[in-house]
Image (cartoon, helix red, strand yellow):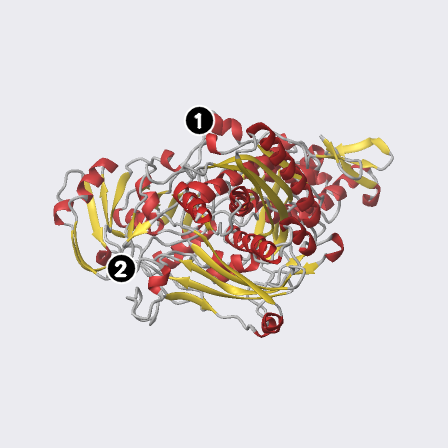
Amino acid sequence: MQTSEHGSPTLLGASTRRIEDDRLLTGRGRFIADVVLPGVVEAAFVRSDVPHARVRGIDTGAAAESPGVHAVFGGAEVDLAAVPDRMPWVRPVGHVPLARDRVRYVGCPLAVVVADDRYLAEDAAELVDADLEPLPVVGTADQALADDAPLLYPEWGDNLLLSVEPDTAQVDAAFAELRTVSGTYEIRRHSAVPLEGRGVVAEYRDDRLTVWTSTQAAFVVRGMLSAVLGLPERDIRVITPDVGGGFGQKNEIYPEEYLIPWLAMRLRRPVRWIEDRHEHLVAATHARDTTIRLSAAVREDGTIAALRGRVRTDLGSGEIFPAGYGPSLVSVGSLCGPYRIPRQAIAVQGVVTNKTPTGGYRGFGAPEGTFAIERLVDRIAREVGVDRLELRRRMILDPQDLPYETAAGARLRSGTHREAFERAVVLGERMLAEERTNAGAAALLGVGYATYVEGVASTTFSITGTWSSQDSADVRFDADGGVTVAVGVSAMGQGAHTTVATLVAEALTIPIEQVRVVMGDTDTAPFGLGSWASRGALVAGGAIERAAEVLRRKGTDIAAHLLEAAPEDLELTGGRFQVRGSPGSAVPWSRVAQSALNRTFELPPGVDPGLEARAVYEPPGLDHVPRPDGKMNAAAGYTNATHAAVVRVDAETGVVEVLRYAVVHDCGRVINPLTLAGQIHGGVAQGIGGALHEHLPYEDGQPLATTFAEYLLPGTGEVPEMVVEELGGPAPETPFGVKGAGEAGIIGAPAAIAGAVEHALGVSGVDVTPLTPSVVRGLVEGARS
């Protein structure tokens, strides 16, 4: 047990064992593939093997006659509504769960086969004959924007799902007067690749649909199922079992999540679909694939007076909800980082191509924006002749600058921007010196840095056109003093059960063992928007704090009546209501609960039986749409961090090895150091993967990485031991003083590693990831020539 700043015991900051781990580590978890219902049949999908074609017909006759087959459907036979386009600021896609008229990417579902088991379903799927008339392929964003480009959606007149052109008047004067430094920065297409793929199980019984799905947002799935299936939400139950990693990729609503429930309703029996890895790599959303062109108006000392440029993202076919343009908007909001850059004017282009749709992935645009600005700052330092670290010191926010509004509109009310940077530099320079001592003078070693601000618990309205940012909690006492809490956030391996239980135990001053957590079921949990944008601790914490306050007030009134004391004379500590200064005169929660639930005749006059509370929390101060000036404060809070990466480069092979890594981070009050460390370590590992290894290349619309033989993931040998240090304290603007930390590890890694490679080679222009051996060899050869 820790001690708070007031000297009272607190669970916050203690390395509590995760309450979910025993069940998961002993094989008692229940993942989507473990959901097997009596009489269940299995589905397999027929997917397009051409990137762009007109659907002339689907012949399912031979498949329907195949052994064990119950049904085969093509798109024309599925009477589902199109997925609604609810965002008026983007072009309508009108996509349907099974292609009817046109396919726009390899992996697009064309037909579905239902059979006794998956093997029979796949055998029959091979007999489906899809008559596809090939159309010209749009392979890249540049091709999509050419004057003579084929159109994926002819009714649009171009291939832009989203196009935002800012007013540049506010930056034009700075660019007219000052030196300009420019660069183009690219993070190529890769993907989340969670350990567990996607899956859906559905059953329609007693006029009610129950859907088990591996998702991060059960209530959002319920809402979209209602819209597409035409059922009232009250007649749909969505259950999220254990989820083996989500990382934003499972925050999309996929065609299979509509089709499997439709099949269960049509066939009147349970239907199941479990994704295989090949399907995952071609049909689950991809991410990144963003090019950012930036120019800075630079003062004589190198500091930036204004930014202008363009964020361009290849969205693939765009056939996903929410649409994949959201990370582009976050990239724009991330460009100024923790720096005093007073103005920016950034255009956004979301381009459709014949590739798998892009969607969310951990960081959600922040790694791209951070990569661009940190690479540009290093370029400015070289061109102006200023040390790269000194230039950052000249621009980074100081404590006295807070509160501060960035050029994009983010309102930073707390943070340790300079302190985190300076500490990371100490660690980075020390690590580099130690590695140089060990490796010798000939080794190509370098250190790179990335400093950033991360918005947490953001609004979702700008990408869904429906939901905003609220979440709920039900907190209920049992007669023995135990507590059940139900919340709208969900678990996907990040320790959400432990976090929620800790906050409830803290708010009610009871042992964590007395708290039971319920989540991931739309019938038993209160309405909530799920887990994404590092929001869980903040929004669940806000709802828990409000519900707990209601219970504390009622508990105080009941305890005062039992003790024959005035309510204002009582304090709650250690799970007991006691008279101040008289520890012996006290009653525990269990006694209060007995009176509230069983011995109701003991209640004071005017107090109703029961001891439970429901509360809703919506973070204050959020902008759900841009303000008239185009700015937007889209997040409830902002964490900050600086990463330092030390690398070794083999100039002959082009192999980059990350030797040492440090993160100095501020997420407000730390709830559980073990859980936080796991979040950061895992995020850095994914960031290393995206920076050096992971890539989903295409050639003429054909994906070239469709198994793990071609899609390279970092293993334990590629991820070094890390130093992680936490700064700061309780954030004054958030419940419990906490901020999110789910994406902290991944945001800084690409920029820090690229900076380290550039430092090691003594070259400029390390402006693209992944830094594969061939890319690095090209940099070396360019420097030699």
Q: Residue at x 69, y 46 (%)?
A: 737
Q: Give the x, y percent position of residue 258.
A: 34, 52
Of the residues tagged 1 and 2, which is closer to the observer?
Answer: 2
Disc marking residue 206: none
Q: Which residue is mark 2?
A: 137
User: Disc 1 versus disc 2: distance between alpha carbons?
Assistant: 46 Å
Q: Name the residue at the top extreme.
A: 26
Left or right: residue 332 compared with residue 385 = left
Q: Give the x, y percent position of residue 71.
A: 20, 46
Q: Which residue is mark 1?
A: 27
Q: Residue at x 59, y 41 (%)?
A: 644
Q: How many marks?
A: 2
Label 2: state its secondary structure: loop
Residue 483 appears anywhere in the view = no
Q: Residue at x 67, y 32 (%)?
A: 14
Q: Within the image, what quadrant is residue 447 found in?
A: top right
The amino acid beneath tag 2 is Val
Q: Is residue 437 above or below residue 134?
A: above
Q: Are marks 1 and 2 in contact (CB under 8 Å)?
A: no
The amino acid beneath tag 1 is Gly
- Mark 2 Cα shell of 10 Å, populated few (<14), some (14-19), many (≥20): many
Q: Give the x, y percent position of residue 622.
A: 61, 60
Query: Along the line of sight, which residue is nearer the eye, 724 or 537?
Result: 724
Q: Within the image, what quadrant is residue 28 found in?
A: top left
Query: Along the line of sight, which residue is nearer the eye, 293 or 577?
Result: 293
